[in-house]
Image: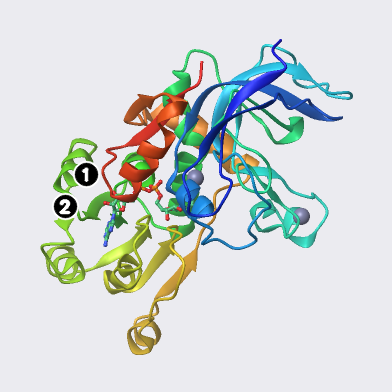
Amino acid sequence: MPTTMKAARIHAYGEALRIDEVPVPQPDQGQVQIAIVASGVCHTDIHATSGDMAGRPSLPFVPGHEIVGRVSAVGAGVQQIKEGDVVGVPSLHWACGECDYCQAGWETLCHSQLATGYSVDGGFAQFCVAPADFVTRIPHGVDLYEMAPILCAGVTTCKGLKQTGARKGDWVVISGIGGLGHVAVQYARALGYQVAVVDISDDKLELARRLGAELTVNAQLNDAPSVIQREIGGAHAVLVTAAAKTAFRAGVDMLRRGGVCVLCGLPSGEFPVPILPVVLGGLTVTGSIIGTRVDMDEAIAMAIEAGVKVQIEKQPLENINDIFARLSKGEVLGRVVLEIS
Ligand code: NAD
Ligand code: ZN
Ligand code: ZN
């Protein structure tokens, strides 16, 4: 067992990550240590390292929250997981289990929660530690690199779609066909929805068509809400997974009466909500943040049963700054997954 490891760390908000040689973290009581195999790069990692998210953690830290690896050591008191088990570490690193939210099944809203790759060092490294109670078992026989993005992109969109309350046959718009959105299209098809998609890149729209989207709209060339209203009479539900602020108001404007717009993207700032259409049309605008451990089990099971396949591009840890630059510019098709081992 090595005593040091490579980790990509952010030392100053908005600056490049540095590959540092740091001590391998050791598992405390109730924790497991994981030798990371695959680690997805989510757009939230860019928000986190630019410092535009709430509750900035102390620097330096290791981003990354779509982690799959093998348990390499267990801390005292860990019973349910043993060395060699293949597990995933999601964004929800830990929640208290005792507050009103945790007790009501909303551990993702826990005020005391810890976030992997933000308040606790994450997956852009060779090893990490996590509470045994919050790691996810990865079923045998799956591709670990393709599974890593399910730990955030998968569970977030699967949960967000459930929050729309849409029914089989309803029209659901996925706005933003990046890492999250291209997975959302597949969950939406698996749930029996008719899927329309909006993005500003024709490559992304083409990918969505291959994954089952029936209507595609380029929001840079068209007024996307007008097209959605004209072609399908407005959407029963919209899932906004774009990282751009303009997509938020557009999402609300795409709804038919009684429709639900679920917001997942995390650009900082505000957007105007039009009062009359919301009141007269009985619209719902709501947020959705990652998923609970129960949501995670469902997202993984459904990904396997329905054949949800993440389009991945493998890259070495050393390329992390180049990957961030491409992701910021919208140049990644699907998800980049770091090939750690
Ligand atoms: P990504 O960069 O892979 O994808 C974003 C997509 O949005 C790109 O395809 C881009 O072309 C598209 N886009 C840009 N402008 C657009 C517009 N005006 N209309 C429609 N599409 C547009 O990012 P990602 O990893 O999929 O993450 C997307 C967003 O979701 C980020 O803000 C991220 O922080 C957030 N996120 C939220 C949660 C959550 O729990 N709520 C979880 C993970 C990620
Ligand atoms: Zn994420
Ligand atoms: Zn709690």
Q: Which of marks 1 and 2 is in front?
A: 1
Q: Name the residue under label 1.
A: 204
Q: Residue at x 44, y 47 (%)?
A: 157
| Near-viewer residue (2 or 29) | 2
Residue 223 image position (x, y, % from top left): 15, 69
Residue 145 image position (x, y, % from top left): 44, 23
What is the total number of numbered labels drawn onto the structure image?
Answer: 2
Label 1 sits on what residue type?
A: Lys
Q: Quadrant of residue 62?
A: top right
Q: Which residue is drawn at 46% across and 17% down?
A: 142
Label 2 near ligand 1 (CB < 8 Å): no
Residue 187 visible, this orientation: no
Quadrant, the N terminus: top right
Say which element carries label 2: strand
Label 2 sits on what residue type?
A: Thr
Q: Mark 2 points at which residue?
A: 216
Residue 288 visible, this orientation: yes
**148 versus 59 height, above or below:** above
C-beta proximity under 8 Å, tags 1 and 2: no
113 relative position to 276: left or right? right
Q: Distance between the residues labelled 1 and 2?
A: 10 Å
Q: In which quarter of the image is residue 51?
A: bottom right
